[in-house]
Image (cartoon, grey):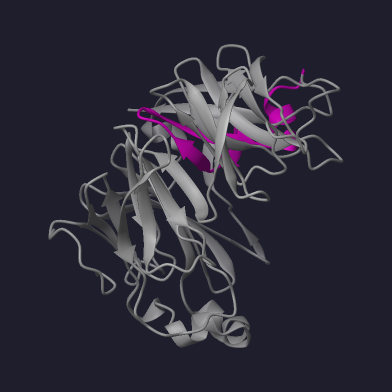
Amino acid sequence: MSCGQKQKEKTDYVIIDLGNTINKQGLKNFKLNDIAQSMRLIPIETNDAMLLPHVIIVDATEENIIIHGGNVGTFKKAIYFINKMDGKISSVINRYGDGPEEYRSIGDAHLNKRHNTLFLYDFNRRRINEYTFDGRFIGNIRNDSIGIFRALPDGNLVVSYAPFVDTEFSLGIYDSSWNLKRRGLPKMREKIKFDMIYFDAIVKFNEEYFYKLAHCDTLYRVTSEFEEPYLVHSKGKYKIPLDIKANLSKTERDGYKYIQQDDGILISKYYFLTYYYDNKLYSEIWDIENSTLIYKSRYGRDGGIRGIPVVINEKKIYVWPTYVSIESLYCIIEREDAINLIPSLPTDTNPIILEVKLK
């Protein structure tokens, strides 16, 4: 369970039993509506200066959803604050360039809600820029170690170190001025050289954050002071041996026999989990109060279902959450389904966002 780490002792963690449920089904005829209290479609404003084929949700406040994306035909990405009521752009951080107050890439971005600013990690330049919500530059600091980062409720930041960083630890806790406070989760002791780069994951649940090591099946709750086991993916015979995972040719030949790329989102009592097995994408929903599988879908070369069904305006589409806040989960609905739901949208419409408040 602990992957060889020494953390705060905890024994009442959640078990997600993938090994014994991989061939089982969830509830029949289940749809997202069954656990939703309310749903709202938020069309992202579309204009000639803002055509976004794909977007990533960065954060959400009571008034806005914060996304980043690039215009068609360009790698110039910006941060957009989208008003939840009408989908209009309320603010933009668009400082792409070579200047001292600009960025060349968006490796990650996150709100500093205590100070109403946004941290943006420029991966190309290995530095964190800080901006006000209207794009005014505040300052920056160099950091060569970041893979991804998130802001903890107390204002400190949890950083997942990039795989190529030479450190004995997987994560670091920094204050809001990016001063290191402590490191945690020692890297695994196995001296195995991997042919591929694997990134650790940081999962949000309410206003807490959880950390999953790339080669470990345990999800750790992370605070400024400690990390502790919270949830375990129990894979049984479907757990991939490290010697296969480390070797590209072995992974391509035998990897389909095992569960891989398992990644989840927590909200309320639900765990939305995806993984690959047998050359198929599995999408599952678990009730973590009693470790029960609620929903499962499979999608592969021969077809199947990708995501979870939801009925909106008497039309059924399939979605999957990409971001959660305290009460709501958010799904990106791409162009074809967006026009199906709202025929009045232009043919070159941006994606729309589905906001779901759970019961």
Can I make out residue 353 in this image? yes
**Toward the viewer: 126 or 333?**
126
Residue 226, above or below 98: below
x then y, percent, for residue 210: 34, 49
**Toward the viewer: 244 or 224?**
224
x then y, percent, for residue 349: 78, 27
Residue 46: which quarter of the image? top right
Can I make out residue 30 in this image? no
Residue 54: which quarter of the image? top right
On the rendered structure, is 115 left or right of 46? left
Q: Is residue 336 magenta?
A: yes
Q: Is residue 14 magenta?
A: no
On the rendered structure, is 118 left or right of 95? left
Residue 243, above or below 296: below
Quadrant of the frame with the C terminus: top left
Q: Magenta segment range?
A: 316-344
User: Residue at 29% of width from left, 55% of height from top?
Assistant: 220
Count of numbered labels shown in the rendering:
0
Quadrant of the frame with the N terminus: bottom left
x then y, percent, for residue 119: 53, 34
User: Residue at 87% of width from left, 41% of height from top?
Assistant: 73
On the rendered structure, is 82 left or right of 241? right
x then y, percent, for residue 333: 64, 35
User: Residue at 66% of width from left, 37% of height from top?
Assistant: 55
Residue 292, above or below 323: below
